[in-house]
Amino acid sequence: MLREARVYDKSEVYQLWKQSYPTLDRNYLNFYFKHLFDSGVCLIEEKDQKIVSSLQMNRHVLHFHGRKLVCGFLCGVSTSPDYRRRGYMRKLTESMLDEAAHTHLITLMPAFQPRLYEPFGFHTIYYQKQYMIKKEELNKVTIQNVSYSAELKELLEVYQKFTSRFDGFYERTLDSYEMMQKELVATQKQMVIYRDENKEVKGYLIFGMKNGEVHVEEAIYLDSIVLLRMLKCAIGKAEEIFINVSPSEKLEKLFPLAIPKKNSYIMAHINNYELFNKLFCCDISSVKEAFALLHKPLWIHETY
C-alpha cells in the first residue's frame, strides 16, 4: 500500500535509509532525521505490515532565469533489499512526480544513477569538478586574515554576493545558516572565514575528513586570494586537499598541476512544460532546452 508517511513512521524510515545507504556518514544521517526529515513530504510503500520502500521530496526556492521558483528535490530513494526489483520505487517516483506537476515546475535529484531515472524524464544538467590540490602548491600562500567565526548575517551576505554571478542556486536565509552550523557540529566539520583589512567577510570554506583525507564541502569566495588562503588553512598537516566546484570555476588557473575529475551531480525534471513555456515565453520540450535558457553558469550545491 502506497501512502504518505506519518510522524510515527520516522524511526522505521530511518532504519530503511540506514540499510539502503551503508556508507552514508551516520552523524549526518542522525542530523538529517532530527532536523530535516519531514514525514509530510515522504511517500512510503507498505508490504507485509512494514515499510519496504520510501522516497522524500524536499522543497526549496530556486533562482532560475531571473525568477525565484519553488522546486522539489527528490532524495532518500530507498528500498529494503528483500523487496527490490518489484517496481515499488517506480510506483513511488511516478506518484511523487504526479503530485509535483500541480505544485512546482522543476524537480531536482542527485545524479547518482542517471540511467535509472532518465525513463521518468530526468536529465543530468549539472556536473561538479573535483580537484586534488597538493600541499606544495600552497607553499607560498599565507593564512593571513583567516579566522574561524562569523555572524550568520555575514555568511548570508557573502553567499549572496558569490552566487550573484550564477544561476540555479538555492535561496538561503539566516535560518539556513543556523541549520548549517548545527550540521557542522553534528558532523564534526569545520568552517574557516576570510576577512579583508576592513574586517568584512569575503569568503568561507566548509571542510571535513573523509577516509583520512581533507575534503572541502563548500567554497564561497569573492576572489582567488581568498580561496587560496582558506585552502592553506584547511589543509593543515595533510599532504593534499580535495575540493568540488562548479564547471565554470577554473581552478586549474591557480593550480596548473591539478587535473579536474568530472562527476555527475544533479538531474532535473520539468513537471509541466505548458506552464513552463508560458512563464518564460518560450517553446521548449526537454530539460536540456529549459536549462539552455540560462545566461549565467549553474551553481548547485545542496543535496537534499
Image: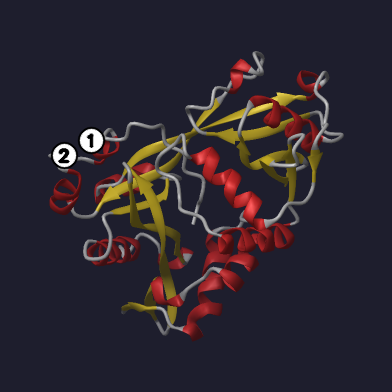
Residue 25 position, x and y percent, is 66, 56
Q: Nearer the viewer, residue 172 or 257?
A: 172
Color encoding of the figure: secondary structure
Identify the residue at horizontal 71%, vertical 58% (top origin): 187
Q: How crowded is the residue under tag 1: few (<14 C-alpha within 10 Å), some, or many (20+)?
A: few
Three-letter residue code for mark 2: Ile
Quadrant showing the N terminus: bottom left
Residue 162's label in the rendered image is none
Residue 39 position, x and y percent, is 45, 76
Q: Residue furthest right?
A: 237
Identify the residue at horizontal 36%, vertical 39% (top origin): 124
Q: Nearer the viewer, residue 98 or 206?
A: 206
Q: Residue furthest front?
A: 198
Q: Nearer the viewer, residue 37 or 263?
A: 37
Instruction: Kindly identify which residue carries mark 2.
Output: 284
Asked if 130 appears above or below 57 in the picture, the reply is above
Could you tell whether 153 is left or right of 235 in the image?
A: left
The reply to whether dot 1 and dot 2 touch (C-beta < 8 Å) is yes
Could you give the CA–CA distance between mark 1 and mark 2, rounded to whole angstroms? 6 Å
Q: Nearer the viewer, residue 295 or 47?
A: 295
Asked if 232 appears above or below 211 in the picture, the reply is above
Number of marks in picture? 2
Residue 32 position, x and y percent, is 58, 66
Three-letter residue code for mark 1: Glu
Q: Earlier in the sequence, mark 1 or mark 2?
A: 2
Instruction: Kindly identify which residue carries mark 1.
Output: 289
The answer to which image quadrant residue 245 occupies is top right
Identify the residue at horizontal 42%, vertical 68% (top origin): 54
